[in-house]
Image (cartoon, grey):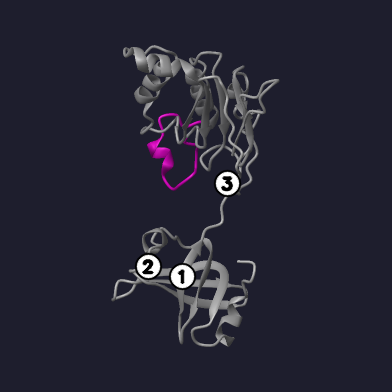
Amino acid sequence: LINSISLNRVKTKQDREGVSIIGLVSNKKITKKGNLLVTLEDPTGSVDLIINKQNEIFEDAKNIVLDEVIGITGICGQDFVFVNKVFFPDIPVTNEFKKTNDEVYAAFISDVHVGSRLFLKDNLLKFFDWLNGKSINLLNRNIGKKVKYLFVVGDLVDGVGIYPEQFKELDIKDIRGQYREAAELFSRLRKDLNIIICPGQHDALRISEPQPHLDKEIAKPMWEIENVTLVSNPCLVNIHASKNFPGFDVL
């Protein structure tokens, strides 16, 4: 897309002329003929795109979402740009392949919501038993014990005053009490398990990102668990690094 142009310049192109553009998806729908109609916008204007249902990219293009930035190459028509290819920006792909000789696992959970009446405490404790190597099944028990990193990616607690009438749905109505309960539960995990926790919109800090780590005063019991690391949202965390291995970067 090195030759991409601003959207207001598309109208200056001749019929059937090739074009490359980048923009923000402001609208998306299926036409009566079954084709995909996508509207792109940038600071200079907007352009309608047609992705034909017979095009090999049609199925992938259906995954386009509103407010997503995409790039396309296509052919100019009278009122539309007919798309040939769609480009999705992503983390740069490299040929680097990191591999460690250790058989270790990382587990990811989120939205625990300690303090809510809908908090699935029994399910969480069963999961903790598996991590602690207490599964009845020998294979599952061995895998659980090989999990060395547990990421909790947001909403450790349900919070207080997050949405209207939430107070009626809380078992623990004090935010500090919610973190005390969370700390009591997570302290049951084996101490060689590294627990990395970042906040979400239900936690006791600002909702907008970037969010800092959990407050040292409000969430004090979580800070006191020796194998818990509290990080910001977002955060780039390096795990399993050693003298001879650079480790893995987890965003």
| Image depth: mark 3 or mark 1 in front | 1
Q: Position of residue 178 (x, y in %)?
A: 50, 28
Mark 1 lies on residue: 84
User: Does residue 163 belong to the magenta stretch?
Assistant: yes
For this view, does 61 lie left or right of residue 226?
A: left
**Main SS category, magenta section:** loop
Residue tagged 2: 55
Callout count:
3
Label ID, residue 207: 3
**In the rendered structure, are the residues bearing label 1 and label 2 in contact, judged by CB atoms less than 8 Å apart?**
yes
In the image, is residue 191 part of the stretch drawn in magenta?
A: no
Residue at 50 percent of width and 32 percent of height: 156
SS class, disc 3: loop
Amino acid found under the numbered disc labelled 2? Asn
The boundaries of the magenta stretch are 158-174
Q: Nearer the viewer, residue 40 or 201?
A: 40
Q: Amino acid at mark 1?
A: Asn
When the figure is inspected, residue 54 is found, relative to residue 112, above or below; the finding is: below
Q: Earlier in the sequence, mark 3 or mark 1?
A: 1
Q: Position of residue 75 (x, y in %)?
A: 49, 78
